[in-house]
Image (cartoon, coloured by chain):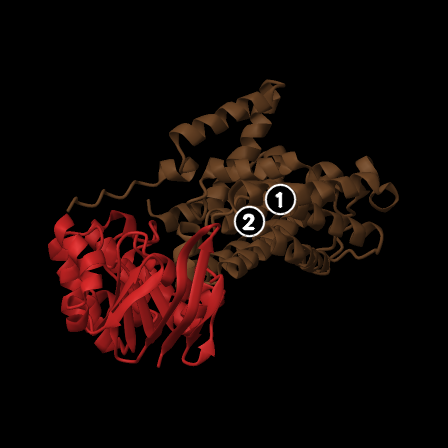
Amino acid sequence: MILRAVGLRKLYGEVCALDGVSLAIDAGEFVSIIGPNGAGKSTLINVLTGVLRPTAGAVTFKDRDVSGLGPARLARLGIARSFQLVQIFPDLTVLETLQAAVVSRLGRGTRLFASLAADREVQEGAIDVAELFGLGEKRHVPAKQLPQGDKKLLDVASAFALRPELILLDEPTSGVSTADKTTIMESLVSASKRIGVRAIIQVEHDMDIVFAYSDRIIALHEGRVLADGPPAAIEADRRVVDTVVGRRARAG
Amino acid sequence: MSGRLVLAAALGAAVLAPLVAPTYQALLMLPFMAYAVALLGLNLLFGYTGLVSFGHALFLGIGAYTGAFLTSVFRVRSMEVILVAAAALGALVAAPVGALCVRYVKIYFGMLTLAFGMVFYTFVLKFYRLTGGDEGMPFLRPALLGRRLEGLSKIDYLVGPYYYYSLAVLVLATLVMWRIVRSPFGLCLKTIRDNPTKAETLGIGVARYRWYAFVISAVYAAVGGALLGPPTGNVDPTLAYWTQSGNIVFMTLLGGFASFFGPVLGAFVFIYLQDWVMSIVPFWRLIFGAILAVIVIFAPGGLAGLLTPRPAAAPRP
């Protein structure tokens, strides 16, 4: 067991975004979290990655209680994430963005007088990840000048550059073209194998991607776990079809 | 002409200035060099970390008063001791002040730094017995590299040994800052400037790094403040007043905070332009206000931004 959440509750004033969510993620799993808008998916990711503090409940990572630890500390422990709305460093190049992640992973951020350009481990680590995500040729392009699909890819790539044990992806293919969606998913699956990511959790609305890549699916509805199982079982679950999958099919 | 050639030419001109320029113009280089040191530090906070301090006159004041105390109260005349003590005191004060300020961003950070700056200003203004109040304290002529240089007239001292001493400090401070901004630490600061949320998720402790930048910038400001003392021979509270903080932010904007040398250029243009405008009209602040408005509206990259060719736009996908 790499990650366990028990009885997570998150209140925004009177509104209950998470209402006793429990889940467990094993090493080697690719788990998708699905649910209609407002189900609590992004809140769950934000609680699991330390961006939000749970109102109640606990999160353990490799049997260590990490509830309430901020994202920076969780990242150093081996939990990385990407965002639903793409998060980049606009004025940094692709390579600098990835270098920052590698510097952080190697714990070299406080080296005031070391030359970044002369640090071969950082340089090579960043170039490796850029190549892995097909961004090698654009490594000197400022992030703000990248097309939307590449910005998303860079956001995901920078999380992978941390070489995390667990990665949480909040809608990794949102806002990009259908062609780019496949590129992103294939890149992150192959990068996971290469880098040695032990588990992936993604929030995703595109059911084709969810069913194509997931080992397990957790369906959320109104802040609670509606179903938790392999894709075939989820597809056969009437409650999930009625509240999540079916509703999406009709909407599409 | 490449950047290195421009830099070499500027350095060469600075070295030759006391020999070829009128004495008065050479004397104006002294506050320029002192402010340039302070601005290198301020821009680590502003241009590289994204935090605008409106209270850095606090640290200029600490540096200057450190020198005044050491020379006139403790009879310590070594400029090296003064600079080290100013840097240490700057860091000592910046540590708790920064710890409080970096918890806030944007206008709240700016206002909090301004508040601390005004606390210090009021302290040096009102504690007359300790600081001399509005009359200030004498900053006696310091010895340079162990040489007391008492035989020189004040002008000969300032445009001679002290000029080159200040230039050496500026060059050293520039080299150190150049190294810092190109280090892994400098890269982490840039991530925080661009997107602190993303930086945090990459494991970069935003508040911690902001604090480091604040303390380093305070050390630079304190060293710059100590260099400001000997040319006037007196340190008074106006050095710690909020308009000083405004002036150094103005210099940074004038030169361009997005460029490493922008603030240094800003300090140079500010000092000479101020002197020239003041010699023509009494309402120099009006002129400077108009200049600031023009820069912010038409040249947000400052003078360095105007001098640097813009990179070609990336092709659209």
* Image spot of residue B123 (x, y percent): 78, 43
Residue A35 locus on image (x, y percent): 26, 58
Callout 2: few (<14), some (14-19), or many (20+) C-alpha neighbours within 10 Å? some
Q: In the figure, A130 relative to A230: above or below?
A: above
| Residue A118, visible in the rendered structure | no
Q: CA distance from mark 2 to mark 1?
A: 8 Å
User: Could you say which is closer to the camera, residue A211 or residue B253?
Assistant: A211
Residue B25 shown left or right of residue B261 in the figure: right
Location of residue A140 with respect to B251 vertically, above or below:
below
Q: Residue at x 79, y 39 (%)?
A: B125
Instruction: Specify whether B136 is left or right of B275.
Output: right
Number of other residues with Cα within 10 Å of mark 1, as a class: few under 14, some 14 to 19, many 20 or more: many
In the image, the chain rendered in brown is B
- Label 2 secondary element: loop
For the point 80% across and 35% down, which residue is it?
Answer: B134
Q: Residue at coordinates 33% horizontally, 54% vertically from top-left? A: A87
Q: Are marks 2 and 1 in contact (CB under 8 Å)?
A: yes
Q: Secondary structure at mark 1?
A: helix
Chain of the residue where label 2 is placed in the rendered structure: B
Instruction: Report the number of discs.
Output: 2
- What is chain A's hue in the picture? red
- In this view, the residue farthest toward the front is A238
Relative to A165, is B145 on the left or the right?
right
Q: Amino acid at mark 2?
A: Tyr
Which residue is identified by label 2?
B104
Q: Give residue B112's mark.
A: 1
